[in-house]
Image: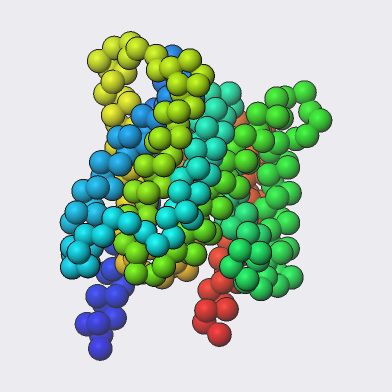
Amino acid sequence: MPHKRRMRTDRTALAIACMLMSLTLFDAMGLIIKHLSPRYGVAELSAWRNLFGMIPTLIVLYAARDWHARGRIWRLRQWRLAVGRGVILVFAQFAFYMSLGILSFATASTITYSSALFMTAFAVPLLGERVGALRWSAVLVGFVGVIWIIRPGSDSVSWAALLPLFAAACYALTGVTARLMDDDVPTPLINLYSTGVAAIGSVVLTLFMGGFSPVASLSDLMWICAMGAFGGCAVLLLIVAYRMTEQSNLAPFSYFGIPLAFVLGWLFFDESPWAELFPGALLIAAGGLLIIWRERRLARD
């Protein structure tokens, strides 16, 4: 019995490590997008990210034994839902990538962490979940933090802060609708559908907005490849983490990206937006952690 408990603990620790690495890769992808945004359009950066990001997903799908055992099925019964998730992802990426070119890196990244609050709200109409007063209070606390950062009516470009907020709502919508998919569908296949549709949508959007810009240098090409690889691997590491242990074990670590984004923005872009982020960022994290605590208590009961 102690041996089994030790193995379970080891898997949880490995899952936490995978999640922290995933958040680090997501932030690294964001840094590259902010670095490339002065020379390339938002839509084309989204297109490159999705095109290169499909490579890790295909590798994991072909390595999945269950997928091979079931006859390597590509078609999904709920393909319309999968395509819809990809369309939503196009809007999410476009808004978030645009915000990275306007706002400080830490501010744009922090606002997207309100997606946990949106997921709680969307779970009511879409999944039929019952949300009590405590969790609604947590959502309210988190949104007060978002409003604190956005500062409506101030002299700053508060409209730009609505972009990552919109992206957070879209990312939350893709997360909630993923739970509507059939349980026997491999997660990499769901991700492949979403990323593939997002790639097609962002390519069409790029062509509509004037086409792709010539890649200026070999270093830019390497950055573009790294952007897609980091984004694709981050998603897969997150999937691996959630399959290795319960979501409640990982959720407290999901806000690791907020201080990490602040440090990375300071190191690479000499940004230190203390006045913009605090105490709003603390309220966003507090609201999310309160939801997590309530979920764990309900699961225990």
Q: In this orientation, does residue 56 appear?
A: yes
Up the image or down, 96 lies above or below 76; here it is above
Residue at 43% across, 39% down: 198
Given residues 273 and 99, the one toward you in this image is 99
Residue 111 image-quadrant placement:
top right
- Which percent across, then down, holds residue 119? 59, 58
Given residues 261 and 217, the one toward you in this image is 217
Up the image or down, 1 lies above or below 141; here it is below
Residue 40 image-quadrant placement:
top left
Q: In this orientation, does residue 285 appear?
A: no
Given residues 72 and 119, the one toward you in this image is 72
Residue at 46% across, 45% down: 86
In the image as oriented, which residue stretches furthest toward the bottom? Answer: 1
- Which percent across, then down, holds residue 149? 68, 38
Query: Seen in the image, is 48 located left or right of residue 279?
Result: left
Quarter of the rendering occupied by the C terminus: bottom right
